[in-house]
Amino acid sequence: MGRTLFLGTAIGAVALGALTAGLSTYFGSLSIAVAFINGADYIVSPTKVYFHRDLAGSYESKIALVNFGPKPMRVVGYQADCSCVSVPGLPLLVESRGRQEIPVQLTVANHDVAVNVMLFVEDQSSHLNLVELNVVAR
């Protein structure tokens, strides 16, 4: 009985690991796969952007907007708590079932920064949605 239970648990763990690896590979990350499985129209990933800075200056990172829906959507603008953060290249179109990388730029002096950024996303029904990002530099 104990050996059968161990074997069943081991097979289950291997199958779960293979499923997780497959979903992560196909979707690019596990959080995007989970959003798709849960029926989301789109996802922005990651929603927390960390900059590890050594000196004052400008830094850039990218986030991804993944559109699971049958119609294109657009990122039409943003608003940040601080002028030190910018999101260039807007408006940005994301095709149906497409993925688009969005640059997030940060210009900082010699101090830590934590900034909230709201992205304005127009979905397939022309509704305007707010997506919150947290930008942190340490």
Image (cartoon, rainbow, N blue to C red):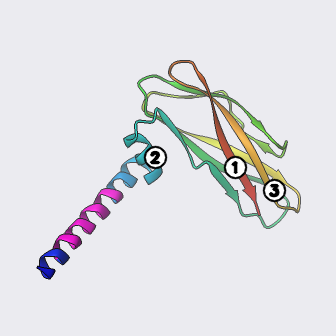
Q: On the image, numbered disc 3 is attached to which residue?
A: 113
Contact? badges 1 and 3 (CB < 8 Å): no
- The percent position of residue 137, horizontal first and vertical second, equals 76, 59
Magenta residues (range)? 7-20
Contact? badges 2 and 1 (CB < 8 Å): no
Main SS class of the magenta portion in the image: helix
**Res 29 visible:** no
At label 1, counting other C-alpha atoms closer than 10 Å, the crowd grade (few under 14, some 14-19, many 20 or more) is some
- The percent position of residue 62, horizontal first and vertical second, equals 62, 48
Horizontal side of 44 relative to 58 (left or right) equals: left
Horizontal side of 30 relative to 133 (left or right) equals: left
Choose the circle earlier in sequence order: 2 or 3. Answer: 2
- The percent position of residue 110, horizontal first and vertical second, equals 88, 62
Which structural element holds mark 3?
Answer: strand
Of residue 41 and residue 3, the one placed in the foreground of this image is 3
In the rendered view, tell whether residue 86 sits above or below residue 22: above
Residue beneath the point at 36% across and 49% down: 26
Q: On the image, numbered disc 2 is attached to which residue?
A: 32
**Res 106 visible:** yes
Q: On the image, numbered disc 1 is attached to which residue?
A: 134
